[in-house]
Image: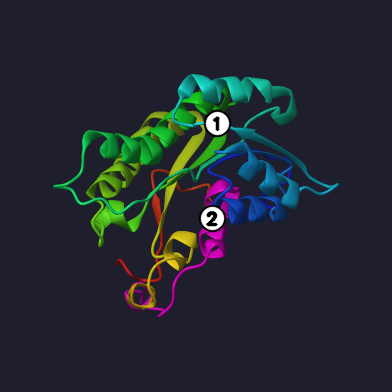
Amino acid sequence: MRLQGRSVVVTGAAGAIGQETARQLLKAGASRLLLTDLPRSGVDAVAETLRDGHFEIASAEIDVADPAAFVDVLAEHQAFLGSIDVLVNVAGYWQIIDFVASDADQWDLMIRANLLTAISACHSVLPQMLTQGRGSIVNFASTAGEYGSIRPSAAYAAAKGGVIAFTKSLAREVSPRGVRVNAISPGPIDTPALKAASDEARAGAAARTLVGRLGLPADIASGVVYLASDESSFMTGAVLAVNGGSLL
């Protein structure tokens, strides 16, 4: 029960990794969980699946990249959450985009979905975390942000690289005041996006790892729980690599 009594906010909770992260946060003892995503039907379904008499779970539809909207949602759920102890920024989006053929709208979408969501969420929760003098934030980076996207998606890689720089810089600002900020960097994970790829592409992704398999959402979620908990109390500004050895 590493997170017993903690209130946790999870963005992007309707996706495969977001759902598993919420499940493992509850298993680790999180007492109150606010799940957010688009559309409402998806995140409500996840909350209903996870809801149990022993757990308090709320859900909300929101574009996390809109700071004002996110602040409103937090205010609406203030009585439910009490303090906000942990923020997990799973929200993101990946798409193959040929750079030369890309346009400004495609870049805006990728930056907004993968970088501005993290910035907006952090900006919204940090005033309360700093006032209470404690908190743990887990942002989602990617191996693409560390060494570039293998498949054409420079916009995604740039956004995730921005998450890494943002995480490190924010940690310098707020960790002396009690708030830890880390990132997790997944390698090839067997999510619906990868399940839709060809057998050849899936096999190639698995072959890039040293363990010879694709990662599972549970592999990422367990890393999130570690970063969220006091077990990682001496870690801040770090990027936790969960990539099966595909990047050393």
**Residue placed most toward the observer, 39 or 81:** 39
N-terminal of the pair, mark 1 or mark 2, is 2
Q: Kindly identify the residue that appears in the image at 66 percent across and 54 percent down.
A: 23
Q: Kindly identify the residue that appears in the image at 20 percent across and 52 percent down.
A: 98
Which amino acid is tagged 2? Answer: Ile
As drawn, 44 above or below 98? above
Which residue is under mark 1? 62
Res. 207 visible in picture:
yes
Q: Which residues are magenta?
A: 205-231
Res. 231 visible in picture:
no
Tell me where residue 133 appears, x and y as whole percent: 56, 27
207 left or right of 80 in image: left
Q: Is residue 230 magenta?
A: yes
Q: Quadrant of the C terminus?
A: bottom left
Q: How far apart, in angstroms, are the residues tagged by discs 1 and 2?
A: 18 Å
Secondary element under disc 2, as helix, strand or loop, is helix
Which residue is under mark 2? 17
Tell me where residue 195 appears, x and y as whole percent: 46, 67
Q: Quadrant of residue 241?
A: bottom left
Q: Kindly identify the residue that appears in the image at 36 percent across and 34 percent down.
A: 112
Tell me where residue 233 appears, x and y as whole percent: 53, 47
Q: Kindly identify the residue that appears in the image at 20 percent across and 43 percent down.
A: 102
Q: Is residue 120 magenta?
A: no
235 left or right of 20 in image: left
